[in-house]
Image (cartoon, rainbow, N blue to C red):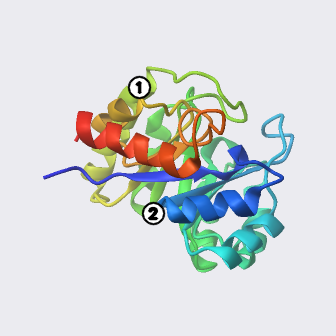
Amino acid sequence: MKKKYHLSASLICANPLEMGRDIQFLNEAEIDFIHFDVMDGSFVSRYGLYPEILQEVKRNCGIPVDVHMMVNNPEDFIQTFQLAGADYFNVHIESTKQLSRIIKKIKEAGMRAGVAINPATPVCNLEWVMEEIEMVVVMAINPGIVGHPFIPGMLKKITTIREMAIKSGNENLFIEVDGGVTPQTAGKMIAAGADVLVCGTGTIFRPHEDTIINKTKDLRKIIEEHVL
């Protein structure tokens, strides 16, 4: 039986002047998720997407959106992104000292709660919330940096998180890998225990090579022929 996996398109890698067109391409490519990066210039030194863009995304497609909050004080944004249409609301474990309370508020707002974890953060910090969440975003590069190479040590982290999820009874937990996803690394990530891969400039957003639709097909073919 083939292992099920999902592809999540990193919208920040789309052409900002042709975002509507690119979203249509993602629809046609039958992408599984849209990954929506929110950055405040403080938690990370870049700025990301904003809620009005998310509103337009949800207005124009039915693809589930996982929002990745690379911000300080993430609970201040829960209502804003719930109203904008977020399906998953992922907060960085490093951004708060009150993670369990924020997870509860995310659920009360009607979104699915997730936690993102930086490369240097020990996975044991997730253990006490493992039963409460539906997604873990494993940063395979340092957050806020586009195009950096995959950190190989993250494969072990992915496997450890999968083992923790099974042990806690949360077998349906999505482990999403953000950063460093390429045709060469995708299979290794899935084999390690990941089931959602965030696709950006290393995979599907490469207009100098081919269309989003064709690059998505190419990536799926590589995964399905050589990994599963």
What residue is shown at x 78% (from left), y 37% (from top)? 44
Quarter of the view holding residue 13: top right
Residue nearest the viewer, comparing 183 with 43: 183
Q: Are marks 2 and 1 in contact (CB under 8 Å)?
A: no
Residue nearest the viewer, comparing 25 with 179: 25
Q: Is residue 6 above or below residue 141?
A: below
Q: Is residue 50 visible?
A: yes
* Residue of label 1: 184
What residue is shown at x 80% (from left), y 48% (from top)? 48
Q: Is residue 89 visible?
A: no
Residue 163 placement (x, y as % from top left): 28, 42
What residue is shown at x 57% (from left), y 48% (from top)? 212
Gap in angstroms between the C-alphas marked 2 and 1: 33 Å
* Residue of label 2: 132
| Dot 2: element | helix
Residue 84 placement (x, y as % from top left): 74, 74
| Identity, as a three-letter code, of the amino acid under mark 1 | Gln
If you read the primary sequence from the N terminus, does the residue marked by circle 2 or circle 1 appear first?
A: 2
Horizontal side of residue 14 vs 202, given as left or right: right
| Dot 1: element | loop
Residue furthest to the left in view is 1
Residue 37 placement (x, y as % from top left): 70, 50
What residue is shown at x 62% (from left), y 35% (from top)? 201
| Identity, as a three-letter code, of the amino acid under mark 2 | Glu
**Label 2 Cα neighbours within 10 Å, binned few <14 / some 14-19 / many ≥20:** some
The disc label shown at residue 8, or none: none
